[in-house]
């Protein structure tokens, strides 16, 4: 009979660890938290030091009974939830529910391999209450903001809306970028490139130089006429090499992955949204069957902000690099990377678990998604342990009368880490220039003027939003994916063509929150709060002081907002649209999905419809217009004549899509 009960979060993790530990332990899964703050009420005693009231989660009651039953005849309980503050809180709650009178041990491991798990059980210790207090303070703060602000939004905008301490700031970042885009005015400019070659060379040996200066001043070409005039002048010039600069550069390898960097690179290289990346990473961490019935974790713990690597992993990587590529690719001293402030010291970077398993060697046991992500992690880790690359950058200035053209090329002298990990810009390749001598005269093959327009900053992708959240200190490794998932599921942001666009609802809610809760909506304030919550973990801050310092000003702002916040919900914005059910005029109203047209005769008449984009349905003789609709799969556009016209499309016609980017107009109304 098993002597110890081991509790983890997931069945997959339970299966892998059970195989490692054998019959002396019974391994069970809690499926995450067993208890939480109650649904439907705040669950915090504000008069008693913010004491939380925890209740058993409804669909965890059966699991809790099973855990209690299993614990009865066990000598000890081993709590092996994930090695972070959330895992610590799960372990603490479980100990309170089933651990009375039992020996309780906290077990932490960062990779699910036989050696790592057995070593963790040998070194089992106590629950870290500093981590628990930090998690509890976060949970209480999030509950205060969510349960106090959300009802205000229901009253002022529409039912079902939510606000959050971190999610609302993330929406604001997306909204602010959209405002930049809307305010941007494109300016025309032109470039002129010269296709040149050495005297007598073949055309395929030509190279491109770009017009750079006239005398010592940067050339600015504003329109086609200026470009054409310049081309006529440049056609008559002699092209002479006047300066050659050769610069040797060393390119350092990238650090191994943190959570945010993995999410960014998986989006950029594999086009995986962040939640998909984390789901796949969790599968790789918790264990994969490698054909012998013994599952093994293939990567280390995937929620980390550390770039540290265990020395044994560095040694294994060095041996692999020497065997595979030669000793010249392994640095004499292990590469060490800067660890960001407040990174959790016990954590490592995300790397392949030991012993190392080559991606191709395990490919048959992985799904395509698992293989691609594992290979990305493998390549990045090995690259981080390799020598830097050496490059020769050649810059050539070519005189054409008073004008100077510039060409540049790059030669790889030693590829180093680039042998295994090539960044996207290197994938395109860089032109290698021919050898030149000073005063050498070149042949002009062609002059190519090209028109351009300055571009606004791009909308955020999953990757670029995570990058900004990390740089601003908003959120933590475990929260980046949930933040993006939440702001999309709440209809504040939509994902279009891989980029994040705020909805009308996201714009108006952000406007109201910024006006009345400027501190909460300030990224710097949110980052400061995150630091204070981290400091609780390090015993540099007191949990009660952090909560009091936040709640006092927040409760006062809440009282003022209840009286002074704009009542969008009850504003009547008339339009010229006519209700098809009763013939009365329609008005613009808000719901948790955004603006819509409602019959002015409501509630007697329930007539309602979506607001038109103003773009005509492309079906011949239809006469309808496209409206934005939503399904479980996301946004699509349908015809106002539905069901007579069943035309749908996932995107608006490119030439007309600007009409609908954020503020759709309604005939006869002022935009809200």
Image (tube, rainbow, N blue to C red):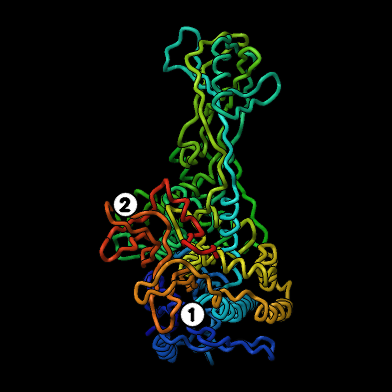
Residue 308 point in image, percent of width and height: 59, 55
Q: Residues within 10 Å of mark 1 (few under 14, many from 20)?
A: some
Which quadrant holds the C terminus? bottom right
Residue 51 drawn above or below residue 664: below
How far from the left and from the top, in percent, is residue 107? 52, 74
Image quadrant where one finds the N terminus: bottom left
* Residue in the picture at 62% in, 70% down: 512
Which residue occupies the foreground of this view, 555 or 203? 555
Q: CA distance from mark 1 to mark 2?
A: 51 Å
Residue 256 relative to residue 513: left or right:
left
Q: Is residue 625 left or right of residue 429?
A: left
Q: Which mark is residue 618?
A: 2
What percent of the width, then of the height, locates residue 380?
49, 48
The residue that appears at 48% across and 60% down in the rendered structure is 664
622, above or below 451, in the image: below
**The quarter of the displayed image where residue 189 is located:** top right
Q: Which residue is more in the foreground, 340 or 78?
A: 340
Looking at the picture, tell me which residue is in the foreground, 493 or 595.
Answer: 595
When asked about the image quadrant of residue 571, the answer is bottom right
Q: Is residue 18 visible?
A: no
Above or below for 223 versus 488:
above
Q: Which residue is mark 1?
A: 33
Residue 111 x/y as whole percent: 48, 63
Q: Secondary structure at mark 2?
A: loop
Q: Residues within 10 Å of mark 2 (few under 14, many from 20)?
A: some
Which one is nearer the viewer's eye here, 193 or 467?
Answer: 193
* Quarter of the rendering containing residue 213: top right
């Amino acid at each position: 009979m098993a002597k110890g009960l081991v509790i983890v979060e997931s069945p997959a993790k339970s299966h892998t660890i059970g195989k490692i530990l054998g019959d002396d332990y019974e391994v069970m899964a809690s499926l995450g938290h067993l208890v939480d703050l109650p649904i439907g009420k705040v669950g915090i005693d504000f008069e008693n030091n913010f004491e939380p009231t925890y209740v058993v989660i409804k669909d965890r009651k059966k699991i809790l009974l099973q855990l209690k039953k299993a614990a009865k005849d066990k000598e000890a309980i081993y709590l092996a939830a994930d090695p972070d503050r959330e895992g610590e809180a799960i372990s603490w709650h479980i100990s309170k529910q089933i651990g009375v009178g039992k020996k309780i041990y906290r077990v932490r491991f960062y990779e699910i391999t036989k050696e790592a798990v057995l070593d963790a059980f040998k070194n089992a210790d106590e629950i870290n209450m500093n981590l628990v207090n930090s998690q509890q303070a976060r949970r209480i703060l999030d509950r205060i903001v969510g349960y106090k602000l959300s009802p205000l939004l229901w009253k002022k905008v529409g039912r079902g809306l939510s606000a959050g301490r971190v999610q609302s700031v993330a929406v604001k970042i997306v909204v602010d970028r959209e405002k930049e885009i809307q305010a941007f005015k494109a300016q025309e400019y032109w470039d002129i490139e010269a296709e040149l070659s050495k005297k007598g060379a073949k055309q395929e040996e030509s190279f491109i130089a770009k017009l750079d200066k006239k005398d010592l001043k940067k050339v600015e070409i504003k329109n086609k006429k200026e470009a054409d005039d310049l081309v006529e002048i440049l056609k008559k010039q002699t092209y002479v090499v006047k300066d050659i600069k050769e610069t040797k550069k060393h390119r350092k390898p990238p650090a191994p992955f943190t959570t945010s960097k993995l999410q960014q690179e998986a989006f950029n290289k594999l086009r995986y949204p962040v939640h998909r990346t984390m789901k796949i990473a969790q599968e790789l961490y918790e264990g994969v069957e490698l054909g012998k019935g013994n599952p093994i974790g293939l990567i280390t713990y995937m929620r980390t902000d550390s770039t540290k690597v265990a020395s044994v992993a560095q040694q294994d990587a060095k041996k692999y690099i020497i065997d595979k590529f030669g000793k010249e690719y392994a640095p004499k001293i292990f590469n060490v990377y800067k660890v960001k402030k407040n990174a959790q010291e016990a954590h490592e970077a995300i790397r392949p678990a030991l012993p190392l398993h080559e991606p191709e060697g395990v490919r048959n046991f992985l799904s395509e998604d698992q293989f691609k992500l594992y290979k990305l992690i493998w390549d990045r880790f090995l690259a981080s342990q390799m020598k830097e690359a050496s490059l020769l950058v050649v810059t050539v200035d070519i005189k054409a009368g008073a004008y100077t053209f510039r060409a540049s090329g790059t030669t790889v002298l030693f590829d180093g880490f680039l042998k295994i990990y090539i960044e996207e810009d290197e994938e395109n390749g860089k032109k290698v220039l021919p050898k030149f001598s000073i005063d050498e005269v070149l042949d002009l093959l062609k002059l190519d003027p090209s028109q351009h327009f300055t571009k606004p900053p791009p909308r955020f992708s999953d990757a670029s939003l995570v990058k900004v959240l990390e740089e601003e200190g908003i959120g933590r490794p475990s929260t980046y994916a949930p933040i993006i998932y939440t702001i999309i599921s709440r209809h504040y942001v939509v994902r279009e063509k891989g980029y994040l666009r705020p909805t009308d609802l996201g714009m108006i809610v952000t406007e109201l929150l910024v006006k009345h809760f400027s501190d909460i909506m300030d990224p710097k304030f949110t980052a400061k709060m995150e630091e204070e919550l981290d400091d609780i973990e390090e015993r540099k801050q007191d949990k009660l002081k952090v909560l009091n310092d936040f709640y006092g000003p927040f409760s006062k702002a809440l009282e003022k907002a209840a009286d002074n916040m704009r009542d969008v919900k009850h504003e009547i914005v008339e339009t010229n649209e006519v209700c098809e059910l009763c013939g009365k005029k329609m008005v613009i109203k808000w719901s948790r999905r955004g603006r819509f047209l409602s019959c002015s005769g409501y509630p007697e008449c329930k007539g309602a419809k979506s607001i038109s984009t103003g773009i005509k349905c492309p079906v011949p003789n239809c006469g309808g217009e496209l409206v934005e609709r939503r399904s479980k799969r996301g946004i699509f556009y349908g015809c106002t004549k539905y069901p007579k016209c069943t035309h749908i499309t996932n995107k608006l016609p490119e030439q007309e899509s600007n009409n609908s980017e954020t503020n759709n107009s309604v005939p006869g109304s002022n935009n809200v």
